[in-house]
Image (cartoon, grey):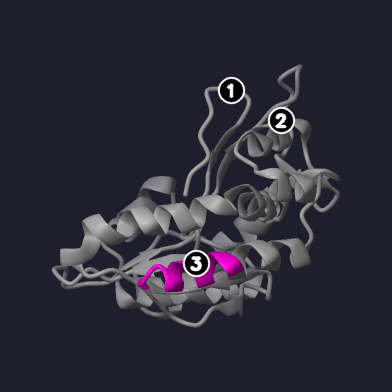
Amino acid sequence: MRISTTNPCIRVLVTHIVRKAMRFTAIATAMAVAIAVLSCDNEGSGKSAGTAQGLNSIALRELRKDAGDEQAAMLEDGKISFDEYEQAILPTIRCISNAGITVGPPELKYQRKYYWYDWEIPGDRADQLFPKLDACTSNWQPVVDGWYLENAPAEEDIASGRRALVTCLRDAGIDIPTQPTEQDFARFRSSPSRDFIGCTEKVREEFGLIGFAG
């Protein structure tokens, strides 16, 4: 599930928190919500796409492009409430299940702000079921994406999460610099160990950093 734009002031990539297990792969692939936001105002001074007070005008404009009438009504006040998020994400999960895709029960996680759910598509039914999955997730995408953007973590929260991750990894006996670079984290992400996965999940839960991996 993706929003993309050529607008130089905002780039948003959002995927539902899902896990896919393909029959012909040895390891289930975890797909967490990934949020990458680059935004700016008309003067280019740099503003967040979303805050506790709501979404900025650029983010709203992008979200409304793909919104149907019901979704647009939820975006009308420039905010997405948790109730509205639930009204979007839970029907999405039901739609996926009704499409014949195996779906695990949704869990409210990450400081009880986001729903996590598993889905599974056998490799021999991928061509048949992935279009149905895309259709289900796309229907309520503007509202779900709006919730993710509105709750995007502040830079200081991400920095605190990184410090906690380093401490957890060091306690697990993993050799990592005290102040690791992005390249250090990328190395761990490219071939994640059980300890790295465990530590990132612990930090996500503690700090509410959905999709965090260093």
Residue highlighted by disc 1: 7
Q: Is residue 180 left or right of residue 10?
A: left
Q: Position of residue 200 (x, y in %)?
A: 47, 69
Q: Determine whether label 2 and label 3 are within 8 Å by CB.
A: no
Residue at x 22%, y 72% (from the top left corner): 27
Q: Is residue 53 left or right of residue 168?
A: right
- Dot 2 amino acid type: Ile
Question: Which residue appears farthest toward the bottom when viewing the image?
Answer: 105
Residue at x 78%, y 47% (from the top left corner): 73
Q: Earlier in the sequence, mark 1 or mark 3?
A: 1
Judged by its main secondary structure, the magenta piece is helix
Question: 79 and 171: which one is in front?
Answer: 79
Q: Position of residue 175 (x, y in %)?
A: 34, 67
Q: Is residue 87 left or right of residue 5?
A: right
User: Which portion, as a residue range, is magenta?
Assistant: 91-101
Residue highlighted by disc 2: 58
Residue 178 in magenta stretch: no
Residue highlighted by disc 3: 95
| Quarter location, residue 72 | top right
Asked whether residue 144 appears in the rendered view, the answer is yes
- Dot 3 amino acid type: Cys
Q: Determine whether label 1 and label 3 are within 8 Å by CB.
A: no
CA gap, disc 1 and disc 3: 32 Å
CA gap, disc 1 and disc 2: 9 Å
| Quarter location, residue 147 | bottom right
Asked whether residue 170 appears in the rendered view, the answer is no
Q: Secondary structure at mark 2?
A: helix
Question: 68 and 208: which one is in front?
Answer: 68
Q: Is residue 10 left or right of residue 187?
A: right
Q: Is residue 98 above or below residue 181?
A: below
